[in-house]
Amino acid sequence: MKGWTKRKLGAVCTLQRGFDLPKKSRKQGCYPLFSSSGCIDTHSEAKVKSPNVVTGRSGSIGSVFFVDEDFWPLNTTLYVKDFHGNNPRFIFYLLKNLNLNRFASGSGVPTLNRNIVHKELVKVPCSLSEQKQIVAILDEAFEGIDRAIANTEKNLANARELFESYLNAIFTQKGDDWIEKTLKEVSTQFGRGKSKHRPRNDKKLYGGQYPFIQTGDIRKSNHIISEYSQTYNEVGLAQSKLWPKGTVCITIAANIAETGVLDFNACVPDSIICLVVDDCQANNMFVEYMLQAFKVVLQKKRKGSAQDNINMGTFKNQLFPFPDIELQKSLVSRLDALSEATQRLESIYQRKLEALQELKQSILHKAFTGELTNPQIKEDVA
């Protein structure tokens, strides 16, 4: 690349560790307080003048932020102590392109060692005007991409809100003939899962043919629990209980009030409540959708302890509205159709978000291979 030179990063910009913040001097003010994850608060003093660049040293390693006002960087960060005459915003993009988290090391808590990073060879244009030209192109391109990302994220949120709004409307506008019942009243089996053996992670329990569902598996499911991360063997099964396919599962610890319906026979721990519905009174998918609509109500009943949770007592007197079984099935059909449509939209928006992020990386890569200052490439990006 004509007019570019290869140098060690330390000769292009000098990184310096951030500062400890004595608790006694902690006072909110007008200066941003930066951690490795970004601006987390304000402080009454500033340690570093703007403009500057901050990257995560520990925690969110490799995150890079451009700071356009005086600020205080915490010791979980590295900031640029010396730009060596280079354009600060150009250095910001240079560090983003380097993917700094690949330099993290340490057996305990990984950290970013500035001395190692300083040795990395980078190519930079010798001309400050070309640096500014690259910055102008990247700023304009990224501004447009960020707008597209924001709009896509808004559309994604709207798709989810549409489903949740329809779901909640069903239960806020229920008919007068709907009957209030407890979950136990509409179940043939209702109780907590079993995992009697201690310690629970004893290897002799695992590696068999019986799926073992945990709270995380339910949280990741989309109404139907179709995947599992662990299995019990005969020893594991003997100290647990096998619940049948179609069982409705409710988490009561960790991920509180998450729900899903088993797509296979499975064991569950006592951090999950299971119910096998009475087909004459309830439809299992209707119950799962209903519990999703009541999630906030159930979460408010959590009890503070070492870990927030709800329990069987939470459901003892909690009434839920049930229409006749045929209407339940009809509502499930409508909710299934809307859920599938929502999932299709979410998939489209997620793919678009991924494509936009990939476009960002592609443009950034072009910037540091000299392609953005090629007239034809610049025209294509614009």
Image (tube, rainbow, N blue to C red):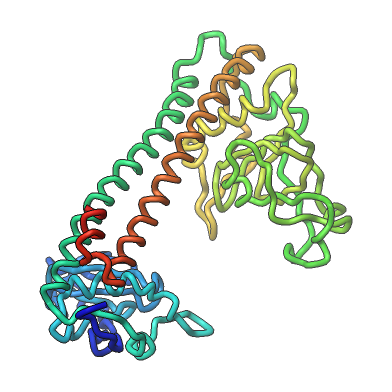
Residue name at image x 54 percent, y 60 percent? 306
Q: Up-down: is 55 above or below 145?
A: below
The foreground one among 58 and 238 is: 58
Residue that lies at the very extreme toward the top in this rendered image: 177
Residue 230 lies left or right of residue 250; in this view the side is right
The foreground one among 125 and 65 is: 125
Q: How many marks?
A: 0
Q: Image quadrant of residue 332?
A: top right
Q: Up-down: is 141 above or below 68?
A: above
Residue 140 lies left or right of residue 199; in this view the side is left
Q: From the top left corner, tell me how far across and down residue 45 is, in percent.
A: 13, 76
Residue name at image x 42 percent, y 51 percent? 354
Q: Image quadrant of residue 196?
A: bottom right
Q: From the top left corner, tell me how far across and down residue 344 is, in percent.
A: 50, 34
Does residue 277 appear in the picture of this structure?
yes
Residue name at image x 39 percent, y 70 percent? 60
Residue 50 lies left or right of residue 163; in this view the side is left
Residue name at image x 76 percent, y 36 percent? 245
- Which quarter of the rendered picture does the N terminus lie within? bottom left
The foreground one among 6 and 155 is: 6
Residue 100 lies left or right of residue 260; in this view the side is left
